[in-house]
Image (cartoon, rainbow, N blue to C red):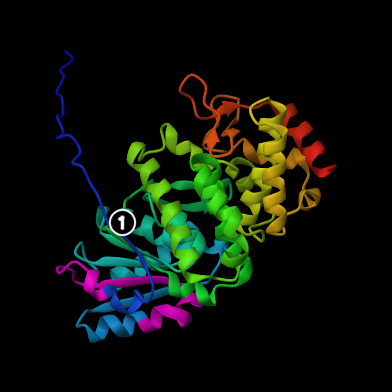
Amino acid sequence: MLKLITVQLPSKKAYSYPIYIGTELLAEVHTHLPKQNSTLVIITDDTVKELYANALQQFLNKAGHKTLLLSFSAGEVSKNGQTKNVLEEAMLAEGCDRDSLILAVGGGVVGDLAGFIAATYMRGIDYIQVPTTLLAMLDSSVGGKTSIDTSHGKNLIGAFWQPIMVIADIAVLKTLPQDHLINGLIEAFKMFLTSDAESLAFLDKNLDRILERDEALLTDLVRRAVNIKATVVAKDEKDYSVRAILNLGHTIGHALEQLSEYKLLHGYAVALGLLLEAKIAERMGCLAPQQYLYIKTLLQRLNIRASDLKQFDVEAIIEKTKLDKKKQGDAVHYVLLGNLGRVYEAENQFTHAVSDDRVRCAFIEVVGE
């Protein structure tokens, strides 16, 4: 005889966390920490370790905290299960327990990897995002997406695990290479394209001074982008609906990253993805031709050219997009622009099926421009 027992769980409590944006915040990290923690585990890469993590550890030690500093080789190629396992084993060997707190100090790779470790270590411990790149400050450090890459694709294994706070020190951007600054600016451009025409105009007007690292303008840029990200995440934490708009340019972009064996920076890959996906939207009648031209022109100011796509085979791109998380059945779904500052929405859907032929035709047109 079949017997049924129902497990009744309490509804999820509302959760919030602060995002601090300012200058010279690294030396003050200890003032924001929760009082109860056994070990502060600083996870970083070998580049950021020398630039900032070693100094941060010294600040924390002087403030009376027990710390453990762990690092790995910088770059997307390290964002995998093997690196995760090595770091977790090191934490276990040092006796880190459920009261340990992880500080993810670095760019998006560090944040994704350290956040995923926090989600799974002892079935979940607290972590703080301390982003040191523009891209991580305005995007990956906010929203709780954590992940590793596999041979089958980017970010396919992971968890939604929110940090307890984000600390973004604009001063560290002084040491950021110019291509990494542009890497983050492209992500800001993407956010403004999807959600905020006013901020898009702000970026367009101030782009030259932002590229020269005007601190006040960079702070404003991060604030604007983070506000968009936080608003979207608050509406759709687990990526079931509106959060998909943040993936504009990413269906193609992730494919290009994989095909380049991650030699192509994420933002640059997304920029080419933006260009191609904007052309798809134009050809489908969602986006006006002059708006596509606006996108193309602004990307050119960031040294992104349509000709950069010529190094890739369109059939290989299409094949890689079939592993995109937005795929439904046999159809790959794309985020499409409907206007500058707004995505195309139909029947409350934020992603739309795009045939392989449409991708091929858009690719041929873009590279031929």
SS for dot 1: loop
Look at the image and tell me in which quarter the N terminus lies: top left
Q: Judge left or right: residue 26 versus residue 214.
A: left
Task: Give the residue drawn at x 14%, y 68%.
Answer: 36
Residue 32 falls in image quadrant: bottom left
Q: How many marks?
A: 1
Q: Magenta segment range?
A: 30-55
- Given the current orientation, which residue lies at the most extreme right position? 368
Q: Is residue 157 visible?
A: yes
Look at the image and tell me in which quarter the C terminus lies: top right
Residue 40 falls in image quadrant: bottom left
Q: Is residue 154 visible?
A: no
Is 251 situated above or below 148? above
* Residue 341 in the image, given as x and y percentages of width and height: 54, 39
Residue bearing mark 1: 163
Q: Judge left or right: residue 300 versus residue 43.
A: right
Task: Give the residue drawn at x 56%, y 47%.
Answer: 190
Residue 45 within the segment the image draws in magenta: yes
Between residues 138 and 154, which one lies in front from this camera angle? 138
Residue 291 within the segment the image draws in magenta: no
